[in-house]
Image (cartoon, grey):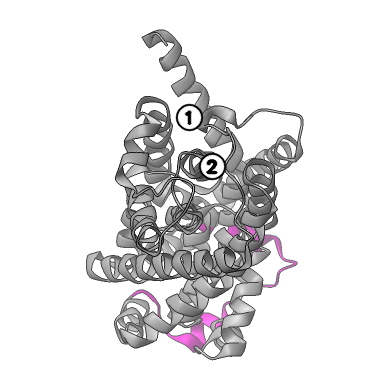
Amino acid sequence: MDIFSMLGDTLYTIAGMAWKILWALVLGFGISGAVQAFVPKRRMARVMGDDGAGSLARAGFFGAISSSCSYAAAAMSRSVFMRGASIAASVAFMIAATNLVIELGVVLWSLMGWQFVVAEFAGGILLIAIATTLVKAFNLAPAFERVRAAETGNDEEDDAAVPSVFSLDGWRAAASHFAMDWSMIWKDIVIGVVVAGVIMVWVPQGFWQAIFLSGGDSVSLLQMIENALVGPIVAVFSFVCSVGNVPMAAALFNGGISFGGALAFIYGDLIVIPMLLVYRRYYGTRLAAMLGLVLYIAMAITGFVIDLLFTAGGWVPKASATSVGSMDFFALDYTLWLNLIFIVVGFGLWRLSKQAPEQAHCCAHHGH
């Protein structure tokens, strides 16, 4: 392949990945803005204010129906945390918003088979359980609480000022939060998508495969462990995001890495470098590092456990000839219609944000 073809493929991949996540970004940031504008802190504290099983289950459910883009999920997770959810529930919300969504299941089924769909959803629940347990074990709540206390004002005044969901001023405030959230991390999103597109085209598939232990037709226990540990790390440095990591995971799996290693790689979109930078903007360097460590450990353990279970049950699929470039980004499918709808929604929110009172803009900026 000549350099001009590779440049063309790179631009196509970058544009395709951006196209695939566009609607989810608008939806996610829109929900984040609405949560900040309309949900009283006391109500959020009642629903997801602790780290009990009920609170985590509700957080997982709300996350699963919210978004499939990791960047938007991070923004929504921060919003529910700032409104009164516990940090454990916020992490559960973020994991569910990226790993327990229908869109991801559709893409996984088409590229990797039903076994990966079942493993992704079962593993997502296990991932939430492990990650939230680690959050409690590392006693991260007090440090996160200090971040929240530093960025929020008096709870009673805040709750009293919450507008009605039926008021135009309320939606102007929500639109203002939407615009501020977007302005805060759009550069990280662009960098992530561009770098991911470049890496997917220019870095040979064999380079990534060489990092993993391979056992040929049979997978040893040592390979399961090593692949589960390495999978998320490869994701970190390949800058994959949301939908974009599935075709690469398919290529890696068909190139010889284990079932659990591919699964752990898919989970890794929550700890890619641009996402870690987003966490840093939200919570500071130390807590971003701790959150990244918690997620990495949970991803590796989940990948290994699911690999063991599926291997024992004889459910691991056979490799095929799927390649990184096999994904048709632009087609007459649900993505097209969702993007058309949410482009209009995003433009409407942007226009509304321009009409928000100056006080709303100041408050939104202060919140960040």
Amino acid at pointer 1: Ile
Mark 1 vs mark 2: in front: 2
Does residue 108 lie above or below 66 as drawn? above
* Marking on residue 204: none
- Name above or below for residue 92 compared with residue 344: below
- The answer to which quarter of the image holds residue 87 is bottom left
SS under mark 1: helix
**Residue 289 on image: x %, y %:** 26, 66
Give the side of residue 300 with respect to residue 17, left or right: left
Is residue 157 covered in magenta?
Answer: yes
Is residue 58 at least partly visible in the picture?
yes
Residue bearing mark 2: 250
**Residue pictured at 69% horizontal, 53% vertical:** 114
Task: Report the side of 275 relative to 109 (left or right).
Answer: left
- Mark 1 sits on what residue? 14
* Residue density around tag 1, few if under 14, some if 14–19, many if 20 or more, within 10 Å: many
Q: Label 2 sits on what residue type?
A: Ala
Q: Earlier in the sequence, mark 1 or mark 2?
A: 1
Image quarter (top left, top right, bottom left or bottom right) of the C terminus: bottom left
Where is residue 151? Give x, y as percent: 36, 74
Q: Is residue 254 left or right of residue 169?
A: left
Q: Say if 24 sits above or below 271 in the image.
A: above
Residue visible at 62% across and 51% down in the picture: 317
Q: Is residue 330 above or below residue 112?
A: above
- Distance of label 1 from label 2 (alpha carbons): 18 Å
Q: Are marks 1 and 2 in contact (CB under 8 Å)?
A: no
Based on the picture, tell me whether residue 16 belongs to the magenta stretch: no
